[in-house]
C-alpha cells in the first residue's frame, strides 16, 4: 500500500458505446487520480459517465482508449484470470443493492473474498471492521433477515475485510432511507479516517458526497471540476455554477 | 392473449428447447417402434403371401401339440399319399416337400451362427411353377451333393456358386456344392433365418425321411376353387393328415409372426412409456420454474385485467405449442430411429426388401396425441400455480418466498406411495383371476404411483440428503463446495423434482441389476447343487435339432469315461395342455444329476410312465399311481401312469420320461445332452481331450464343464441385461437433460448473484466448480432415491418368484458403481450450464434492472 500515494488513476480514458448515429462517448478523455487513504466521491448527472468510470477503474469493464491503473498495475495488461485475482485481492466493492450471497450468513459474506481465495481472514482486522460497521450482533443472520441498512453495512464490511488497496462504492446509500444512509456513510468515513482505507464512491446525492474528502465532478464524459473538503452546501452551490 | 403467449414462448426459446427435447425423444421412441413393427409386419404379410405363390392347397399332418420351434415334428406323409393326391380330379400338379433344421459351417468349419434365427433346410421341387423360393443366381439343385443357399447367408459367409459348403444335419458335416443362390419371394432370406435348399431325394436322404414328405403342395387346375379341392381330397387322406387352403396356411403363419411382432412392439413401447413418464417430471419442473420466474409478468397481466382462466390458458397454450412442435420433431426422430432399427435388423442377418418404411396415419396421430397430451398434463399444475399469482405481485420487489407447509405434501405423497406399494404387492403376491399380463400391468402401475409418491415427498429429503452428500464439500472444494451445497438446498422442491426424474431411471437400472444378479446367483447355486457330471456334450447354438446318438455311443466306449446319461427333449401335451418333456437314461441319470424325488421313485420310469414336477402334479390333481393322458405328435393319446413326483432346478421341462418311452412316442431320435462321468483319476482336462477326439467331426456339438456352464448362462443373462440397460439409458439421458435444464434456469435466476461472486473475485473455474458440484448433489440425490427404490422393488420381485427357487442377491459393487456413475453423469449434465455461468458478463449481471 502506497501511503498517501495514488491508489487508482485514469489516463486519457475513453469509452465508446455503439456505432454510427447511436455512438455514445461515455468517457471522453479523462485524466484523474484518487489518493490512498482518502474518501473520494465522483459526482455527476445521469449519463455523465461516472458509473462507467468506476467500472473501468475497478476492472469490470474495458476502456476503448487510454489506460487505468490500480496502484502501479495497468489493467489493460491483465487477462480475465489476472483481473479476477486483482478484484479478489486488491479491490473491494459495494453496490447499490444485491450485494450479498443469499445462501451465506453475514459473517460468511464478510469473509467471502478471502474464502474465495482459500485464505484465512485476518481475525483482528475483521473484528475491528465488524465493530466499526456496528453489525456484531447480526453476524449469524442470513441477508433475508437483515434490514436494508444492515445489508449495506455487511457489504461494506465485506469490501473492507480483505484489506484491499481500494474500495469502489456505487451509490451505496442509494436504496436506503436517509438515516440508514447517513449511518452507513459515517461508518465508511470512519474506515478511511481511523483504519486508513481508500474508498472511491460514485453518487448523485450531494449529502452523500459531503462525507468524502474530495469530490470530482463529471459531465458528458469529462472532468468538469473538483472540490476538496466538500460539504453538502458547497457541493450544491458548485452544481448550480456548473449548470449555469 | 395469443400474441403475449407467442412472445412469451420466444422469450424462453432455450429453456423450452431442452424441455421439448425430452418429449421429442419419448415420442420418437413411440413412433419408431410403430414404424419399424408396421414395416416389418407388412413385409412379412407379403412374404407369407409369397409362400403360397402357385400353390392352392397344402396337405399336412395335423399338429396336435403347438410346436413353438417345431420340436418333435409329427409323423411324415408317406409317398403313396402323394400318388393318390396326384390322381384327384382338379389337381394340376402336386409335389412333396421336406423341411428340417440345418447348420451351415463357415470356411473355418465352425458353426456359422450360434445365436439368433436358425437356418432351415428344405426341399426345392424341380418344377417351373412359381414357388416360395426364387432363384437369384446359378441353378437349382437337381441331384445329390448340390445345395442352394439364401443369398444373405452366402454373402455373409463369403460363399459363391461353385464353392463347397459343409452342412450339418444329423450325422455331422457333409460337403455340398453350392449351385445356386435363392431368395424368399422379394427378400433375400426369411426374416433373418437362412435356408439351404436340396432336391427332393437328397432332402429325403439327409433328413432321414425315407420315402416320405412333411407336406404336399398342390396347384389346382384352372377353374377349381381351393376350397372345392380341399373337400375332394379330405376322404383320401389317412388319419392325422389334413388338407387346407394355402391361403389359410399363409394367414396362420402371418398371425403367429405378428403376435411375436406385437410382443416386440409392446416391449419397446414400455420403454418409450418410461421415457415419457420421466419426461413429464422434467416438463412439469421446467414450466414451474418458468412460471415462478415470470411471476411479475403474469401479475402484470392480471393487474391489467386478465382473468385467472386466461392466465391458465396462456400457460397451457404455450405447453400445447411446445407439445406439437416437439411431437412433430419426435415423429421425424422416430422415423430415423426406425431406420436405425432396420439397419440393426439387417446387421443381425435379416433382410428387408427395398420397401420404404411404413408411416401410417395411426402412427402420426398416436405420436402427436401422446406428445401433446403428456405436455399438457405436465403443464397443468404449473398453469394453475400461474393463475394463483395475485395482481399485487407485479409491484413487489422480490418474489415472495411462499413456504407452504410440508405436512399436506407428506400426507399426499405418503399415501400415494403406500397405495402404489399395495398395488404392487397385490400384483406380485396375489393370484389374480385375469392372468399374469394383468399382474404385470398392476405391478407397473404400482411402481409408477410409488415414483410419483416419492417425488411428491422428495422435497422432505432434499435438505438431509444434500447435507450428507455435500458434507465433505466445504473441506474438499472450499467455498465453491459450500455454495454448491447451499444452492442445492435452496429450492428443495426444484431439486427434488429434478432428482426424481433420475430416480426413475436408476430405480429401474438397479432393479434390472438386482434381478440379473439374483438369476445369476441362483443359476450358480443350482449348477453347484445339481450338476454332478464332469462334462456335458450339448448342441451349439440354436437348440432343437439335437445330435446323432452315435456320438454318445462312441463316448461311452472311451476308456476315460466311467458312465454317461443321454437326455432328449421334446414337446407333448399332458391332459391337453402342451409342454416340454425331458427324456432321461434312467439307470445313470440320477448319478449325474440331482433332483429331489418327492414321492415314488425314478427307477420305475423305465417302463412306459411319467414323472411329474410336484407343482405340475398338484395343478393336474394327480398322484403317484394314477394315470395321465399324454398326447404325442406321433402316437397320439397315451395313458401313462405317474411313477414319481419330483422337484428341482436345472430341468426346464415339468415332465420326465425314460428314453424308452421317448423312443416309442417320438419321431426323431436325437440326443440333446450327454452327461458324462469320468473314471477316477482322469482329470477334467484330459477327459475333455478324449471326448473331443469323438466330437471333432461334429462342429454342431460342444463340450462343457461346470465352469463353462455357469459362464454360458451368465453371458446370456448379461446379454439381456445390457439390452435393458441400453433401453433404460434413454430415460436416464432424459433425466440428465432435466438436470441441465434446471441448472440453466437456476443460473438465469441467480445471474446477479453469480455476477457479484465474479465481481468480488471468484474465478471462472470456481464458478464452474460451484455449478458442477450442485449438479452432482442433485444427481446423487436422485440416484440414492432410485437405488433405494430399486432395491426394494428387486427384493419384492425376488420374493414373489421365490417359489421358483429364485434367491435374492444384492450386487453391492454394481449398485455403488451406479451411484458413482450418476455422480459422473451429474458432472456431464452441468457442463453446459457451468460454462454459461462462467461466461456471464459481470457488468451486465450486476447492472440494476
Image (cartoon, rainbow, N blue to C red):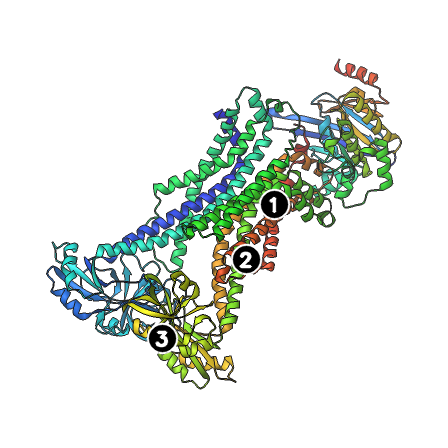
Asked if badge 1 and badge 3 are on a common chain, one would say yes
Chain under callout 1: B
- Label 1 SS: loop
Can residue B687 be spotted in the picture? yes
Q: In the rendering, at what x and y percent does residue B54 appear?
A: 19, 58
Nearest to N terminus: mark 2 or mark 1:
2
Inter-mark Cα distance, 2 to 1 = 29 Å
Q: Which residue is mark 2?
A: B514
Inter-mark Cα distance, 1 to 3 = 65 Å
Q: In the rendering, at what x and y percent does residue A68 appear?
A: 75, 34
Q: Alpha-carbon neighbours of circle 3 within 10 Å: few (<14), some, or many (≥20)?
A: many
Question: Split into 4 quadrants, where in the image is the C terminus of chain B?
Answer: top right
Of the residues tagged 3 and 2, which is closer to the observer?
A: 3
Camera-side residue: B580 or B668? Answer: B580
- Please tell me whether residue A153 is drawn above or below residue B685 in the rendered image: above
Nearest to N terminus: mark 1 or mark 3:
3
Asked if badge 2 and badge 1 are on a common chain, one would say yes
Can residue B744 be spotted in the picture? no
Please give left or right for residue B9 compared with residue A165 in the image.
Answer: left
- Label 3 SS: helix
Q: Alpha-carbon neighbours of circle 1 within 10 Å: few (<14), some, or many (≥20)?
A: many
Q: Which residue is mark 3?
A: B659
Image marks 3 and 2: residues in contact by CB distance under 8 Å:
no
Could you tell me which residue is drawn at 52 percent across and 57 percent down?
B798
Nearest to N terminus: mark 3 or mark 2:
2
Q: Which residue is mark 1?
A: B830
Of the residues tagged 1 and 3, which is closer to the observer?
A: 3
Camera-side residue: B359 or B463? Answer: B463
- Please tell me whether residue B533 is drawn above or below residue A186 in the rendered image: below
Q: In the rendering, at what x and y percent does residue B210 appear?
A: 23, 74
Camera-side residue: B612 or B545? Answer: B612
Amino acid at each position: 500500500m502506497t501511503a498517501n500515494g495514488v491508489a487508482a488513476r485514469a489516463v486519457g480514458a475513453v469509452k465508446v458505446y455503439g456505432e454510427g448515429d447511436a455512438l455514445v462517448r461515455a468517457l471522453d478523455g479523462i485524466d484523474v487520480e484518487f489518493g490512498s487513504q482518502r474518501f473520494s466521491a465522483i459526482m455527476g448527472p445521469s449519463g455523465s459517465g461516472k458509473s462507467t468510470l468506476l467500472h473501468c477503474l475497478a476492472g469490470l469493464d474495458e476502456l476503448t482508449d487510454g489506460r487505468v491503473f490500480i496502484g502501479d498495475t495497468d489493467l489493460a495488461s491483465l487477462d480475465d484470470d489476472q483481473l479476477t485475482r486483482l478484484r479478489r485481492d486488491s479491490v473491494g466493492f459495494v453496490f447499490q443493492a444485491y450485494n450479498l450471497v443469499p445462501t451465506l450468513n453475514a459473517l460468511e459474506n464478510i469473509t467471502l473474498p478471502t474464502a474465495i481465495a482459500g485464505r484465512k481472514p485476518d481475525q483482528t482486522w475483521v473484528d475491528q471492521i465488524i465493530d466499526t460497521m456496528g453489525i456484531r450482533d447480526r453476524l449469524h443472520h442470513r441477508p433475508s433477515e437483515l434490514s436494508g441498512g444492515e445489508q449495506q453495512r455487511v457489504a461494506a464490511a465485506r469490501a473492507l475485510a480483505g484489506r484491499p488497496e481500494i474500495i469502489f462504492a456505487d451509490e451505496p446509500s442509494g436504496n436506503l432511507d436517509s438515516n440508514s444512509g447517513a449511518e452507513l456513510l459515517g461508518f465508511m468515513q470512519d474506515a478511511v479516517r481511523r483504519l486508513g482505507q481508500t474508498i472511491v464512491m460514485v453518487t448523485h446525492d450531494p449529502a452523500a458526497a459531503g462525507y468524502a474528502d474530495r469530490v470530482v465532478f463529471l459531465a458528458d464524459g469529462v472532468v468538469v471540476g473538483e472540490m476538496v473538503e466538500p460539504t453538502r452546501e458547497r457541493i450544491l452551490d458548485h452544481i448550480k455554477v456548473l449548470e449555469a | 392473449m395469443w400474441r403475449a403467449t407467442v412472445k412469451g414462448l420466444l422469450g424462453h426459446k432455450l429453456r423450452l428447447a431442452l424441455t421439448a427435447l425430452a418429449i421429442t425423444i419419448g415420442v420418437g421412441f413411440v413412433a419408431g417402434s410403430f414404424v419399424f413393427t408396421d414395416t416389418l409386419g407388412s413385409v412379412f404379410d407379403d412374404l407369407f403371401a409369397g409362400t403360397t405363390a402357385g400353390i392352392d392347397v397344402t396337405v399336412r399332418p395335423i399338429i396336435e401339440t403347438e410346436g413353438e420351434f417345431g420340436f418333435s415334428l409329427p409323423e411324415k406323409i408317406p409317398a403313396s399319399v402323394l400318388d393318390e393326391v396326384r390322381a384327384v380330379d382338379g389337381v394340376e400338379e402336386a409335389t412333396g416337400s421336406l423341411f428340417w433344421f440345418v447348420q451351415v459351417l463357415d470356411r473355418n468349419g465352425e458353426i456359422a451362427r450360434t445365436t439368433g434365427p436358425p437356418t432351415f433346410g428344405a426341399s426345392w421341387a424341380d418344377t417351373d411353377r412359381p414357388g416360395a423360393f426364387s432363384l437369384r443366381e446359378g441353378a437349382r439343385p437337381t441331384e445329390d451333393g448340390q445345395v442352394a443357399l439364401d443369398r444373405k447367408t452366402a454373402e455373409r459367409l463369403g460363399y459363391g456358386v461353385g464353392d463347397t459348403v459343409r452342412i450339418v444335419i444329423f450325422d455331422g458335416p457333409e460337403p455340398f456344392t453350392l449351385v445356386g443362390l435363392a431368395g424368399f419371394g422379394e427378400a433375400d432370406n426369411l426374416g433373418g433365418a437362412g435356408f439351404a435348399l436340396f432336391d427332393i431325394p437328397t432332402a429325403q436322404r439327409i433328413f432321414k425321411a425315407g420315402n416320405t414328405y412333411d407336406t404336399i403342395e398342390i396347384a389346382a387346375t384352372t377353374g377349381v376353387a381351393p376350397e372345392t379341392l380341399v373337400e375332394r381330397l379330405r376322404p383320401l387322406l389317412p388319419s392325422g393328415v389334413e388338407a387346407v387352403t394355402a391361403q389359410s396356411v399363409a394367414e396362420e403363419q402371418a398371425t403367429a409372426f405378428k403376435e411375436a411382432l406385437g410382443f416386440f412392439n409392446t416391449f419397446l413401447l414400455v420403454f418409450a412409456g418410461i421415457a415419457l413418464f420421466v419426461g413429464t417430471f422434467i416438463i412439469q419442473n421446467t414450466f414451474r420454474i418458468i412460471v415462478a420466474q415470470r411471476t411479475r409478468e403474469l401479475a402484470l397481466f392480471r393487474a391489467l385485467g386478465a382473468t385467472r382462466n386466461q392466465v391458465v390458458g396462456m400457460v397451457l397454450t404455450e405447453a400445447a405449442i411446445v407439445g406439437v412442435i416437439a411431437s412433430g420433431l419426435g415423429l421425424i426422430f422416430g422415423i430415423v430411429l426406425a431406420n436405425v432399427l432396420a439397419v440393426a435388423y439387417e446387421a443381425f442377418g435379416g433382410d428387408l426388401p427395398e420397401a420404404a418404411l411404413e408411416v401410417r396415419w395411426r402412427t402420426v396421430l398416436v405420436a402427436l396425441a401422446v406428445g401433446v397430451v403428456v405436455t399438457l398434463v405436465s403443464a397443468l399444475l404449473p398453469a394453475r400455480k400461474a393463475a394463483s399469482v395475485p395482481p399485487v405481485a407485479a409491484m413487489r420487489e422480490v418474489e415472495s418466498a411462499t413456504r407452504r407447509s410440508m405436512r399436506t405434501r407428506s400426507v399426499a405423497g405418503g399415501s400415494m406411495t403406500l397405495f402404489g406399494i399395495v398395488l404392487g404387492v397385490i400384483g406380485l403376491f396375489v393370484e389374480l383371476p385375469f392372468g399374469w399380463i394383468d399382474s404385470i400391468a398392476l405391478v407397473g402401475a404400482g411402481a409408477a404411483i410409488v415414483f410419483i409418491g416419492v417425488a411428491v415427498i422428495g422435497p422432505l429429503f432434499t435438505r438431509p440428503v444434500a447435507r450428507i452428500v455435500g458434507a465433505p464439500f466445504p473441506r474438499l472444494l472450499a467455498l465453491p463446495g459450500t455454495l454448491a451445497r447451499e444452492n442445492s438446498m435452496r429450492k428443495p422442491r426444484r431439486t427434488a423434482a429434478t432428482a426424481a426424474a433420475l430416480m426413475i431411471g436408476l430405480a429401474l437400472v438397479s432393479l434390472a441389476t438386482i434381478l440379473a444378479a439374483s438369476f445369476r446367483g441362483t443359476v450358480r447355486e443350482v449348477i453347484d447343487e445339481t450338476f454332478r457330471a464332469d462334462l456335458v456334450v450339448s448342441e451349439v447354438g440354436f437348440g432343437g435339432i439335437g445330435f446323432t446318438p452315435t456320438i454318445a455311443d462312441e463316448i461311452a466306449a472311451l476308456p476315460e469315461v466311467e458312465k454317461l446319461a443321454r437326455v432328449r427333449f421334446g414337446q407333448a401335451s399332458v391332459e391337453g395342455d402342451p409342454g416340454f418333456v425331458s427324456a432321461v437314461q434312467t439307470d445313470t441319470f440320477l448319478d449325474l444329476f440331482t433332483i429331489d424325488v418327492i414321492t415314488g421313485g425314478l427307477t420305475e420310469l423305465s417302463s412306459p410312465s411319467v414323472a411329474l414336477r410336484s407343482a405340475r402334479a398338484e395343478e393336474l390333481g394327480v398322484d403317484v399311481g394314477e394315470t395321465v393322458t399324454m398326447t404325442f405328435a406321433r402316437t397320439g393319446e397315451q395313458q401313462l401312469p405317474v411313477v414319481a413326483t419330483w422337484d428341482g432346478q436345472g430341468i426346464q421341462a415339468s415332465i420326465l420320461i425314460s428314453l424308452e418311452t421317448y423312443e416309442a412316442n417320438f419321431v426323431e431320435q436325437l440326443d440333446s445332452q450327454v452327461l458324462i462321468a469320468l473314471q477316477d483319476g482322469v482329470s477334467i482336462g484330459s477327459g475333455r481331450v478324449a471326448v473331443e477326439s469323438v466330437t471333432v467331426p461334429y462342429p454342431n456339438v460342444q463340450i462343457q464343464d461346470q465352469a463353462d456352464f455357469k459362464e454360458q448362462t451368465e453371458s446370456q443373462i448379461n446379454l439381456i441385461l445390457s439390452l435393458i440397460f441400453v433401453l433404460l439409458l434413454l430415460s436416464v439421458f432424459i433425466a440428465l437433460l432435466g438436470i441441465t435444464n434446471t441448472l440453466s434456469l437456476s443460473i438465469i435466476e441467480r445471474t446477479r448473484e453469480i455476477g457479484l461472486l465474479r465481481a468480488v473475485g471468484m474465478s471462472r473455474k470456481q464458478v464452474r466448480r460451484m455449478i458442477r458440484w450442485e449438479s452432482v448433489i442433485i444427481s446423487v440425490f436422485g440416484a440414492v432415491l432410485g437405488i433405494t427404490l430399486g432395491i426394494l422393488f428387486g427384493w419384492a420381485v425376488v420374493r414373489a418368484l421365490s417359489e421358483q427357487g429364485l434367491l435374492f442377491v444384492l450386487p453391492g459393487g454394481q449398485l455403488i458403481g451406479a451411484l458413482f456413475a450418476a455422480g459422473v453423469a451429474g458432472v456431464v449434465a452441468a457442463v453446459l450450464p457451468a460454462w454459461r455461468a462462467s461466461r456471464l458478463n459481470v457488468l451486465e449481471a450486476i447492472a440494476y434492472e
